[in-house]
Amino acid sequence: MSKIDFWVKPAHARLAALGIVVLLLTSLLGACGDAATPTSSAAVTAGAGQAGAKRFDGQTVTVAVGSFMSSGVNMFKADWEKKTGAKVQVVEIPFGDLYQRLYTSFSTGAGEFDIAIYASNWIPEFAQANYILNLEKYYPEKTNWNDVVDKTKKLMYVNGQRYSVPLDGDVIIGYYRKDAFENDQNKAKFKAKYGYDLAAPTTWQQYQDIAEFFTGWDWSGDGKPDYGVLEAQGPKDVGPFIFSARAAAYAANPKTPGSLFFDPDTMEPSINNPGWVQALKDWIAIKKYGPAEMATYGGGTMRGNFVAGNYALALDWADVGVQAQDENSSTIKGKLGYYVLPGSKKVWNIKTKAWDESSEVNQAPFLGWGGWHGSVAAKSKVPDAAWDFLNYLDSTENSLKAVTTPGTARNPYRTQHFENPQLWADSPTKYMDAGPYLQVLKQSNSLPNTQFDLRIPKSGRYSEVLDNWVQQALAGTITPEEALNKAANDWKQITNEAGLEQQKKLYRELEGLS
Amino acid sequence: MSSVKLEALTKKYGDNLAISNLNLECQQGEFIVLLGRPGAGKSTTLKLIANIEELSSGNIYFNDQLINNIPTENRNVAMAFESYALYPHWTVRKNLEFPLKAPGRNIPAAEQEARIRRVAELLEIAHLLDRKPSQLSGGQRQRVSLGRALVRPASVTLLDEPIAHLDARLRHSLRGELKQYQREQNATTFYTTPDYVEATAIADKIAVLIDGQVRQFATPEVVYDEPADIEVATIVGDPKMNILPLAPGATRLEINEAWLQLPPLPPEAGYIGIRPVNIQIFENAHPYAIRGTVYVTEPMGYEQVIRVEAGEQLLNIKTLLTTGTFSIGQTVWLQPDWTTIHVFDRSGQRLKGGFH
Amino acid sequence: MKHLLIAPPLLFFFAISVIPLLFTLGLSVTNTSIGGSGSFIGLNNYAQLFSDQFFLRGFLNTILYVVLGVTAQYWLGLGLALLVNSMVHGKRLIRLLILLPMMIPPLIVGFVWQTLLDSRYGPVAGLFTGLHLKPVPWLTDPTLGFVSIVIVDTWQWTPFMFLLLFTGLRTLPKEPFEAARVDGASSWRIFWDHTFPMLLPASIAAILLRSIESFKLFDIVFFITGGGPGGATNTLTLLGYFTSLRSGNLGYGAAMSIILLLTVVVLATLILIVVRRLMARADKAGQQALDQFLAEPLPVKVA
Amino acid sequence: MASITLDKVVKLYGKVTGVDQISLKVADGEFVSFLGPSGCGKTSTMRMIAGLEDISRGSIFIDDKRVNDLPPAGRNVAMAFENYGLYPQMSLFRNIAYPLYVRKVSPTEVGREVVRIARLLHIEDLLDKKPSDVSGGVRQRVSLARALVRKPTVFLLDEPLSHLDADLRSSMRGELKRLHDLNGATTIYVTHDQLEAMTMSDQIAVMNLGKLQQVGTPSEIFNRPANRFVASFIGEPAMNLLRGRVASTPEGVLITLQNTPFVTLNRETGQAVLETARQEDGVIEVGVRPPDFTVASPEKSGLQAKVRFREFLGETVLLTLDTGAERVRVVAPRDTQARETDLVSLVPRLDRLHFFSIESGMAVAHSD
């Protein structure tokens, strides 16, 4: 997940699902669909086997990609074309429409796209429906497989087979304002008030204390009162990911693995258990430590505001780190500290229906959204070239180039990306003090209790329902308990519609249970 | 330059009969005026001839050839619309040129130019040739519209109230010139107007249209002197002809306790008509006269019109101003000149023959 | 022959309007989702709609947006139109200025208003603080969020009303107004007796157009509040969009569309009826007086 | 009832002068027409009297009260508009009643007055109709009724008949005149139709290009036009204006047209003509109305002319003739024998000749 809101807001809502419904809705919504229709010309030409010709001469690879990730593809396009003789046609699709476009294209067998670059959360659904190619037969030729971060590797397996090529790593981490935290006066004041040292929060309670502490006075020195926290609490955006990330510490119990979203034995939703309720209460509690507008912020607006400098704490993917380096919009370059998502000393146990309390902090970093992956369409007529292009995008050299270039929407996902901070300092990002940043990212990716996002089919609907009810609780119209109970209710219905057994089987498999 | 025959033309708009059983026949080169009140069917008749409106029934012949099924563009008619219908994006010259350039006309450029010149001079718009319609006054636009109809030779020229919006001076001079021009071109012309003076002045023959029918088709003199019925009689002439109803078999006219002996009339006579100039008016009691009260007087230059209430009637009298000065409410005496009366039957039809 | 000629356009119309409508109707009685085929579930979707708290809120919101927004836009637009119409100089410039909001893309409108209403940097907040008032959470309080959307919608679409009403005003004959002045009527009376009734046809057209458009309110909400907080500013189109096309619940979304369509039709009809009644009543008073005096013999001699 | 006085009234539209220094007195109860072609300033003048337009300079008095700054409602004038200015959304009843409603007259009184006026104008059966449902003639009468119902001190009528068809125009002309005769209210009537002005007015104020050309009774205007404009604007067909050479002879002052002697004037008339002509190369403009020529056989002495068109007008014929350089129109009895292309001699009536200065266009003399 990178750079721009999860729910991209297109200037005209593009309504592009099953064409016909759209006609009516279009007239009602006052929106107009202008979906680009790429021409498919994926035929393998005779030239492919001729002597002296390049490997994929005359082939055309059509790539469907979420529009804000396109530069991470385009920057390598020309080189690969030159090398292989193939043509690459990039179809940029606004993120909001990406799922529908891919699904429609795949399910109608239009064979529009050879490569889909999309959220790894959808891999299981597409793989199960045989929309995307099992890549096992290609993987032996991949030389840098081992270098991929473990958790990212796992995202690519369905039924023990790999279906994608990784292009991005997504984990949510915490940010704080190093400059404010290291100020002696602040430190003393904080200690006096809360009885412990001011430092990056390790529990959500500390997070809340710090947020409170930095709210309502001018610690940044710009003459206006500042805020303790900034999170993306707006509707229809990244809210569900941030909220799930907060819930993980309370609800991802290492004793009952794979129980963050559902009870893996019954497929009963977990999201209304006291762990989640606590997380929601926390989330509501920090509203008063941020600006009122926080209630409307998506990921993009949150990032833009945070780097403007009036907030002590934030939660986000790797993006805030990169955005803070841009001196044109950021006032906090070099003032940023990082931490693995705070944890909790109590964690809910769905089996005993009680809190497991401990002096150890339960940390459960959250791989929200999972990152951009590329798959080859099952119907592609040029699978070899498609694989080759994806592999090229993920080559050791190119992936490093991509993750250190701003605007590519690709974040580190290979161990080599974390190893050499100097490379980051020298890259176009000109990252200042990349060491701690990379350290926290790497750690978040590799803790034993790091949690995957919900990846079973209909994850979008689960997410939307959760968002709707959580928004109500945030607005104060209903209680947190009520909200999550209603959400759980709706989740049950969605699960039933999709087929409970089928969902359970896949959920268990993806969570590593059997 | 065709003869035209209209045979039992009928035009319905829904249930509304705009033209009913209209018949008319004219020779090549004749100047025909369709005279009638607004709504009488004048414009509709022109549109039927041009096939802008579709006939409900009836036949139209040009030169004895049935042309019912020939589309407008092939009828070779030229038409000036009352609403002008100029091309707003073209100059006056281009507007005039357009009919000459139509496919199949093949008029040499020099002749085109000569025709435009001639028409522009005739209509006094030569100095306006390079302007666009939006830069013209209403009267100028009407002249351009008229010019567009006159500029090319056509089987029939149709002019729908073509000079209605011009000032009096131009109207007077133009109508003579227009007729002269059409005569030179040997053009068959249909011309509509609600103004009887215009009609009698310009027409070879007038067709008086009432309720979508031709009531009388004759030379101006005949229409004026021998109107076919009461309605025709009251359309032609200003002020209107006075129409007096007669009791059945009456031998005298009784008004305001006085009576006038009538000339011998046929038994079917229902009305007599007297033109306003044919009634004498006296300020003092006069033998052989009926009494009336002045309703209003209207002096106009050398003449005056006096309306007099006499019994149920409001009679128009036209006389010289020197006859006397009358004021509203004054009692006067009237004496018709029986030698000039028109006699109509009960249905309003003219009775033939002399009665004096 | 002539009827044959209009057949192709008719078929085309049928194809682009009736068929999709029927398709949507069909879809609305299934549980089709974007991921697969659905099966017939009768009126379940509709039944569910009426117990769906988000839908009901969105429905109510939509109606309120239409009623409040269009009312505000109408009176403001009318006021501006009258003002500009009475100006002697600078009409062109002021007209252009008034029309500007309408021409700004919704994305920018959203950004501008978010900034204007921001409780930290916004000039509106600045104004409140300047007056020693507490800054108001325009976009984040459920009620105020709703009000803000009405304000922004009004800001953006009053120009449209203005344009229609101004055009309407300019096409009114001048003479009745001069006659009324000579007759001795005050400006206020002239407005109520003449301007307003004579402008009614234009007003009806403008109100109908804006009402139907308002039912489709989408972009401003999408960009400013995203339907929040807690669904307080949701509209039916926004819900329909998210339901059908974001979470792929096509059957349910189709049912929403059908309800929206029905509501638009019913409300537009209602508006027409109400306005017709108004027009009819306007002349009733005079009619009654007339009846009264024609009924009884008069103590005057006819001249 | 009231008198109206205009004192050097000027109306400027930007830099254009619409009305130029008009001074005029309208006596109490008079019917005065403002007559002139479109754009001559007659309507502007009336609108200034009504208060619908600002007065740029000068003063307007109603009775002896200066009304420049009074709004229309304060002047107690009633006006009928060229396009009637009816209230389209109101019934005819409400239209007529409106000025009374506005003045908060009691409903009983309103009803009585409206019906009284409606009967006077024969529209009492149509009062429940809307303006769009009735003919132009009825609208015209409603417009008048609305003006009459108020019993104002001044009536202002702006081309009230211009949109009626000929029949109706002719009968309404009479009705209006009678109405004025009956109620005697001071009336100002704007028209471009000389016939309307001639038939109805006590006084006619002829205007052109924003300036007052002549004020007088219809007879004065017709028989003694003050200048070339008035002479040709009044009377239909228009007066013939012919160029004549002036010479003094023992018998008197001889006018020659086309090198043939035309008339010899007596000393009195002749002197004025002679004096003007002396300053203008010996040339004068002779005005002869079309009925004031007699058509005689060509051997008779008179203006030699060739008939170009002969147009039948009913009682008379209108001849258009060429006299070499000029074109002349003559209205003659219908039994006149002259046909197209015939040569004739035109003999003028000596007591109906008018003489204008070529340069200034001002009347020099009238031979009556």
Image: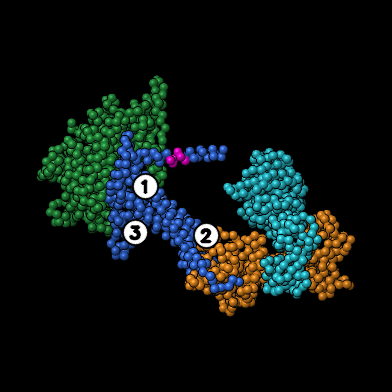
Q: Which of disc 2 and disc 3 is earlier in sequence?
A: 3
Chain letter of the residue carrying label 2: C
Chain shown in blue: C
Q: Which chain is painted in cyan? A: B
| Mark 3 closeness class: few <14, some 14–19, many ≥20 residues within 10 Å | some
- Mark 2 sits on what residue? C172
Q: Secondary structure at mark 3?
A: helix
Give chain A's shade: green
Label 1 resides on the chain identified as: C
Q: Which residue is mark 1?
A: C260
| Mark 3: amino acid | Pro
> Mark 1 touching mark 2, by CB under 8 A?
no
Q: Quadrant of the C terminus of chain D?
A: bottom right
Residues at marks 1 and 3, CA–CA distance in whole angstroms: 37 Å
| The N terminus of chain D - image quarter | bottom right
Which stretch is magenta?
C13-18
Chain under label 3?
A: C
- Can residue D229 be seen in this snapshot? no
Q: Residue at x 76, y 58 (%)?
A: B266
Local SS, label 2: loop
Q: Position of residue D349 (x, y in %)?
A: 82, 68
Q: What shade has chain D been given?
A: orange
Asked whether residue B247 appears in the rendered view, the answer is yes
Residue named by callout 3: C123
* Residue at disc 1, secondary structure: helix
The furthest residue to the top:
A51
In the drawing, does residue D178 fall left or right of residue A160? right
Above or below residue A76? Residue D364 is: below
Q: Earlier in the sequence, mark 1 or mark 2?
A: 2
Q: Residues within 10 Å of mark 2 (few under 14, many from 20)?
A: few
Amino acid beneath label 1: Leu
